[in-house]
Image: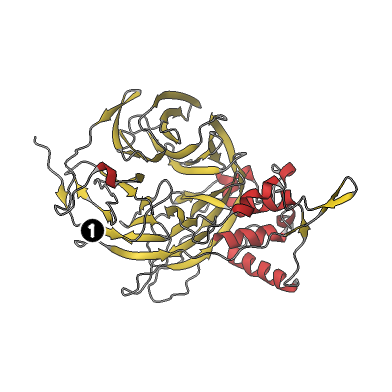
Amino acid sequence: MARSCPSPLQPAVLLGAPSFPNAIAWSDDNLIAVASGHLVTILRPDLPVGGPRGVIKIFPSQPLCVGLVERKGKGYGISRPWNLLSGCLLPTALYRDDKPVVRSISWSPLGMAANSGCLIAVCTSEGHVKIYRPPFCDYCAEWIEVVDITKRLYENLRCTEFRGIGIATLDIPMMDLYFHQKNASDQMDSLYKHNGKLLKEKPENHSPLISADQYASRSAMLCSLVVSWSPLLHLASEHYPVCDSFSLLAVGGKSGKISLWRFHPPVCYTIDDKDVPTTVKFAGLLHAHNSWVTTISWLLFDFDPSNPQILLASGSSDGSVKIWLADNDKLLKLSKMDQTSFSLLKEVMTLNAVPVSVLSVTVHVQYPSKILLAIGKVSGSFEIWLFDISSREFDKLGSYYAHDYVVTGLTWAFGGRFLYSCSQDNLVQSWILRENHLDEVTLNSDMPRDSSINISRDAFDSCFGVAVSPGNLVIATEIKEEYKFTKFTRGQSPELFTMGGIGL
């Protein structure tokens, strides 16, 4: 049977270029989000005319006051301004970015927004995380902010005066003291109001004097790098027999910790009431790594439907990769804000000189008890691991030096039969899993293009992401001085898309 040729569709125009890996994401309600500079562009691939169908604008955030650094210290009998010249404050002193861009995006499962659609989490280069919903009005393009995650985290940490996040005490649970006094099952909106009231009772100019190390530690705790939303979870247990539906948002930061947030679907769906609250609870802090958390991936493993298991994979700038297993009872109870709701299942990779850039995890379609893990690195290579969850055995299937520069996108398709990778070397590659190794599959190079545009390899700067939607394959590139999103279908084969960007 002859393979069907790609049918070109009209390109969509973007308003900026991406800067970080995984710059493109496809939602369960068929919306495409593209991290394009200071904007998140929302596209509708099902519409005949390409172009932005929604937008999220990123503005500079107000700095959060974590304390004042003492200007002078004493040493050898004289006063010296050593605190402000401390090495740990060097990144802060050199920071000059007054135009933040989008660093990471992630869609929620379907049904989390008030209109039954998806929410989107956006992390900026400033380290700020906010949640947005689609507008209810057909004539409004700008998405609406519903939750400021960074501000919620700040209010919680300030309640305890940032106890437990000092340089020497990173392993101490942060919120134990506060949550011995308050039930953690209270909704976060109530906690937020409670915290706001406490803060109002303090003088506005009240800022404690702290050391340079404390300032750096607190700033790292509030500086996020990556966001990732879990699938919709339906959990019940012996102690909690009533099934509870929710989704977890994981936010990784420079401190090496991952903050977890539990979102519940609305009680009812509406497009009339604009003030429907978003129910969110702070689910805890996981001390995942000793360096920056650079990538996070979720997997709902329901090989045993009576006991679904939730896996969290995290990668770090120190080269380590870890797999975490959730305790369903503790997730439902949320008794303390510590890391006990997740336990370390396997440290796949220990410290390595090559930072991890992207992760992708899926269930093996031929072996339902096995999991496939793809690990992309800054060096341009990626590794494939196979994990048997019943025997707890990890096997490395191989390392593949597929690219010359940073691997910016990895995604599995068709239950692990295919893997797609992209990199800053401007290449998108397709791989097929045969037994215990990958074979490269040539992508159809006859990509649909605007006949008025002559594309050369020099017109591209790099590719910044790849995402797969069920049943289709889409490729997005940025061409010359215009940012264009080119899409095409390949008959019955999957859809792939990649993001390319030019230097601004």
Percent across and percent down for residue 454 are 18, 49
Percent across and percent down for residue 121 are 46, 57
Answer with left or right where residue 467 lies relative to residue 179: left
Percent across and percent down for residue 390 are 48, 28
Label 1, residues with CA under 10 Å away: few <14, some 14-19, many ≥20 = few
Q: Residue at x 42, y 36 (%)?
A: 303
Quarter of the image with the N terminus is: top left
Instruction: Name, please, the residue furthest toward the left.
Output: 1
Q: Residue at x 88, y 45 (%)?
A: 76
Task: Give the amino acid type for the residue marked by disc 1 in the picture.
Answer: Asp
Residue position marked by numbered label 1 in the rendering: 46
Q: Residue at x 19, y 61 (%)?
A: 48
Q: Residue 496 versus residue 395: which sits nearer the camera? A: 496
Q: Residue 110 versus residue 305: which sits nearer the camera? A: 110
Answer with left or right where residue 123 lies relative to residue 14: right
Question: Tag 1's secondary structure?
Answer: loop
Q: Quadrant of residue 407?
A: top left
Q: Quadrant of residue 55?
A: bottom left
- Counting labels gives 1
